[in-house]
Amino acid sequence: MSRRKLLARVGWNALGLAVFGVMVFPVYWMVATAFKPGHDILAYTPVWLPTSPTLGNFHDAMSRAYFWTDVKNSLIIVSAVVSLSLVIGFLAALALAKFRFYGRKAFIVLIIGVQMVPLTALIIPLYITLSRAHQVNTLTGVIIMYLTFVLPFTVWTLRGFIMGIPRDLEEAAMVDGATRFGAFARILLPLVGPGLVATSIFAFIQAWNEFIIAYVFLHDSDKQTLTVWLASFTTLRGTDWGPLMAGATLTALPVVTFFVLVQRKIAFGLTAGAVKA
Amino acid sequence: MSRLATEGAPADAAERDLPLLSRRRRRLSRRRVGSALAPYALVAPTAAIIGAVLAYPLYLLVRLSFQKYGLFELVRHQGKSIGLGNYTRIVHDHQFWTVLARTVAFTVVNVVLTIVLGTAIALLLTKLGRAMRLLLTTGLVLVWAMPPVVAVNVWRWMVDYEFGVANWTLTKLHVGNFLHYDWFANPWTGFGVITAVVVWGAIPFVAITVYAGLAQVPQELLEAARIDGARGWNVFREVTLPLLMPIFVILISLSIIWDFQVFIQVWIMLGNRPPSDYFLLSMYSFVESFRISEYGFGAAIAVVMVLVMFGATLVYIRQMVRTGEAT
């Protein structure tokens, strides 16, 4: 029996290792290709390990036209979206968590409904509206659009974080003589800090990864973001795989880093309410 | 936390002090007027932005769908109303029905694969040793974190017809001769690759969420079922599955929402100009609008798309609203 159990455990672990290999292989292949010299990339028999690693592809990618401009654009858009969504979303989350008011239900429906509307459906009217307002091809227009798609999640998640803090704490501070704002600044804000960090990183990832809006609304090469820049590696003559994989690795790096940092908190935030219901 | 909690105790005592309480009450009543307005002030910025970028364009989308709106109208900023013209055109448009059927089939296949494989990996996680579980979870998070645009480019490289690692491997495994095999020459194999990208990218979220849910299933219930004679699959179907139903409603609905509007996976995979064999609804609407400049017709397709999606995820919306209400 115990021998059978051991055998089963070994079997499951072997299966686990196989699943791990299949899932992670594309990520590995991207990084491996990025470090390989050209003749190892264009080889009829795949070179599994980058035995003669080179930074050539990274150098090639980074010295490509508009790389640094597009990095700058991505950073401007992302930091604007993160800071604005955090402030604005926090206020709305506060209202949902702390007050019962007429129209609360309608607001919740709005927040959830927004996430159902397909982006591709909205691009048409947005394009027409912005072209009237002469805001096509500006970072401002893109920032406002991203804000809309990040805000619902921000509000919903922060609401959960705020509700996790016992109301008594604030009331106690107010009875002790703190003003409503004082109680908010000294009690609520520090406690909700981790939630703010997790949510802001989620907003960062969303804005950094977005492709369709940037692709449609930012025409000029010096206005584009990194995800759109990645398309420049494919021309009619074919694709420059080495530099493309290096560029892809560079694009993925900040997101992967931050994601691994906050994944636990976000996964919790998404399901916390659901399990209770 | 505990420090703050003890600070609260003397405050409770002070509240029992009558004169103080009445004074506090008067202050509160004046504050109450402010309180009544406060939530609206707090919600206003979010509502304004969502209204401007979402509600108004949504209204505009519906209005556009009743108009003829081409390049001429775009320059003049003025559409021409044609009533139900775009919708009757949709009904008689052979391509629309093909694309709709293709999109629905694509969504069903992708959602089913994502949920089944994700749940299987979640169940596998419960069987693994600690180290192996950590390794697999880390791998899943890594995949989850990959930006979609990056993921599509990597897969495009892996199935490259000349130097792709997939063709070489499949040939070596004697699945067939895949040397210089162009996956995208045939929409069936092309969509096979696209499905692989979408499902691969979506599995981690499902697996990790279901695994978190499995951890919350009380062990006593499982044991009780086993004592009653239930085995393996039956325990899962009779005990685990009903308990995890709320989670599955969320996961299935989110998957439907995401897979029904798949765009970049097809778009980038086919070098920004997919042939019409590859159109899904989102793309059909996009191409009609931005390539052919038939904005009115494109808008009508988008309206149909929104309606189908709302219908498909009604259960989810109700569940989420109830959650928001209850708390």
Image: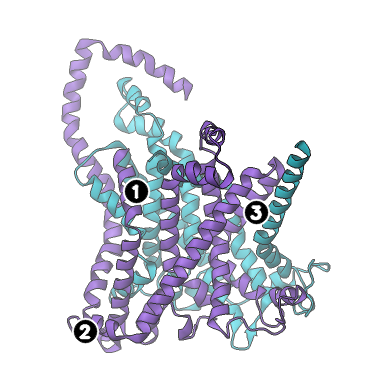
Q: Looking at the colours in the rendered structure, which chain would you say is drawn in cyan?
A: A
Q: Do labels 2 and 1 share a chain?
A: yes
Lateral position of residue A39 relative to residue A108, left or right:
right
Residue sitting at x 56%, y 36%: B226
Q: Reading the chain from its start, which is encountered first: label 1 or label 3?
A: 3
Does the CB distance between marks 2 and 1 fall below 8 Å?
Answer: no
Between the C-alphas of marks 3 and 2, the distance is 51 Å
Q: Label 1 marks which chain's residue?
A: B
Mark 3 Cα within 10 Å, few/some/many (few <14, many 20+)? Answer: many
B126 left or right, relative to A206: right
**What's the residue at 70%, 59% (across, down)?**
A21
Mark 3 lies on residue:
B139
Q: Label 3 lies in what chain? A: B
Q: What subunit carries mark 2?
A: B
Q: Residue at x 53, y 57 (%)?
A: B116
B243 shown above or below A172 = below
Disc 2 or 1, which lies upstream in sequence? Answer: 2
Please state if A170 lies on the left or on the right of B131 as rendered. Answer: left
Please name the residue that numbered disc 2 is placed on: B85
Residue receiving disc 1 = B320
